[in-house]
Image (cartoon, rainbow, N blue to C red):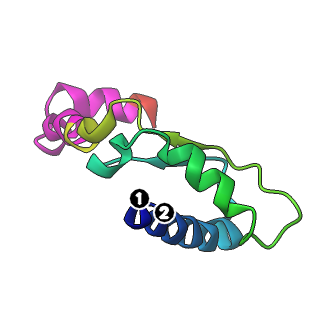
Amino acid sequence: MATRERYEDRLARALTSVVNVLDPHAIVLGGGVSNLPGLAQAVTARMGAYVFSDTFDTPIRIARHGDSSGVRGAAWLWPIALGGARAEDAKRLA
């Protein structure tokens, strides 16, 4: 349990640095570790102590497709890199 609490605290400190500099609209956690139950809530609870503000309201979310999000994005982009049909779709959506 101490290892997980240390991880949550270090992640909260690291993400707070990002929030203090960039002020993102949301933070999305991905990768295998994001599958830990309650990770987003635990990190959110810790961030208030480190942020340079009276309040912390940036939502922390888990990637919609979990630890497969990166692979799904790469697979979607692959035809674009080759100039395939999706290249036209990407130009239209840009």
Q: Position of residue 81 (x, y in %)?
A: 16, 45
Give the residue at mark 2.
5
Q: Position of residue 66 (x, y in %)?
A: 32, 35
Per the picture, the main secondary structure of the magenta-coloured stretch is helix
Q: Position of residue 16 (x, y in %)?
A: 63, 68
Q: Amino acid at mark 2?
A: Glu
State the residue lying farthest toward the right. 54
Q: Position of residue 46 (x, y in %)?
A: 65, 60
State the residue lying farthest toward the front. 1
Q: Report the quarter where the N terminus lies.
A: bottom left
The magenta stretch spans which residues?
Answer: 72-91
- Residue 14 shown left or right of residue 47 in the figure: left
Residue count near mark 1 (Cα–Cα under 10 Å), binned few <14, some 14–19, many ≥20 = few
Q: Which mark is residue 1?
A: 1
Residue count near mark 2 (Cα–Cα under 10 Å), binned few <14, some 14–19, many ≥20 = few
Q: Which residue is located at x 45 percent, y 38 percent?
A: 94
SS category of the residue bearing label 2? helix
Q: Which residue is located at x 42 percent, y 38 percent?
A: 37
Say if the magenta span includes residue 18: no
SS category of the residue bearing label 1? loop
Check contact, mark 1 vs mark 2: CB within 8 A. Answer: yes
Q: Amino acid at mark 1?
A: Met
Say if the magenta span includes residue 74: yes
